[in-house]
């Protein structure tokens, strides 16, 4: 494999593993281009998609909602300046997330990053992850203070309405 492909593979791993696992927000400046645009459906009104500062805010947001975040890149494919990284992530839900109360249980999700890398930095990316599965998991494992007689995840439709 050529040097550029190895460098791109390393940047993709740093994007998903090093930055997220360590919470070291300085990594964003090292691997995210200033004008980088990340295309992702993040169910929040804040723009987490433009440049290293936005990525730092997104990582910080999730570190406030989850303890012990651990991301694992399962597979990386490189073709030209494009890198596809399939990943899984887990963490202990400990803070407010989209109005979902903390539950102190482990939550799991997975996704795929498609990153365009130039000069050793992410210049554009497309992130697709199982947001719905994570929310369903958090609602199903909501704390014992749910309203009496409510079904696990009964608040899901209400949450979806709030996100629109």
Image (cartoon, rainbow, N blue to C red):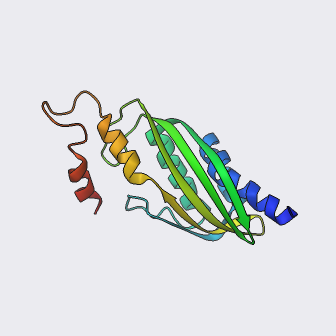
> In this picture, is 141 found above or below 82?
above
**Residue lying furthest top in this view?**
144
Q: Is residue 77 left or right of residue 21?
A: right
Residue at image location 50% in from the left, 60% down from the top? 128
Residue at image location 70% in from the left, 60% down from the top? 77
The picture places residue 113, in percent across and down from the top left corner, at 59, 60
Q: Is residue 134 left or right of residue 164?
A: right
- Total tally of numbered discs in the picture: 0
Q: Is residue 160 left or right of residue 150?
A: right
The picture places residue 71, in percent across and down from the top left corner, at 59, 43
Q: Is residue 155 left or right of residue 120?
A: left
> In this picture, is 86 found above or below 106?
below
Image quadrant of residue 37?
A: bottom right
Residue at image location 39% in from the left, 48% down from the top? 133
Image quadrant of residue 118?
A: bottom right
The picture places residue 127, in percent across and down from the top left corner, at 53, 62
Of residue 149 and residue 159, the one placed in the foreground of this image is 149
The picture places residue 25, in percent across and down from the top left corner, at 63, 49
Quarter of the image where the N terminus is located: bottom right
Quarter of the image where the C terminus is located: bottom left
């Amino acid at each position: 494999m050529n040097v550029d492909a190895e460098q791109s593979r390393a940047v993709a791993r740093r994007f998903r593993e090093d930055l997220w696992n360590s919470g070291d927000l300085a990594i964003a400046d090292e691997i995210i281009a200033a004008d980088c645009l990340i295309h992702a459906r993040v169910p929040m009104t804040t723009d987490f998609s433009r440049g290293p500062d936005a990525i730092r805010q997104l990582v910080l947001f999730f570190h406030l909602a989850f303890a012990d975040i651990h991301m694992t890149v399962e597979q990386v494919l490189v073709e030209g300046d494009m890198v596809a990284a399939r990943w899984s992530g887990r963490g202990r839900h400990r803070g407010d997330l989209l109005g979902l109360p903390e539950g102190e249980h482990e939550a799991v999700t997975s996704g795929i990053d498609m990153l365009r890398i130039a000069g050793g930095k992410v210049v554009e990316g497309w992130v697709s992850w199982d947001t719905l599965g994570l929310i369903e998991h958090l609602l199903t494992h909501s704390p014992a203070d749910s309203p009496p007689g409510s079904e696990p995840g009964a608040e899901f439709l209400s949450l979806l309405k709030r996100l629109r």
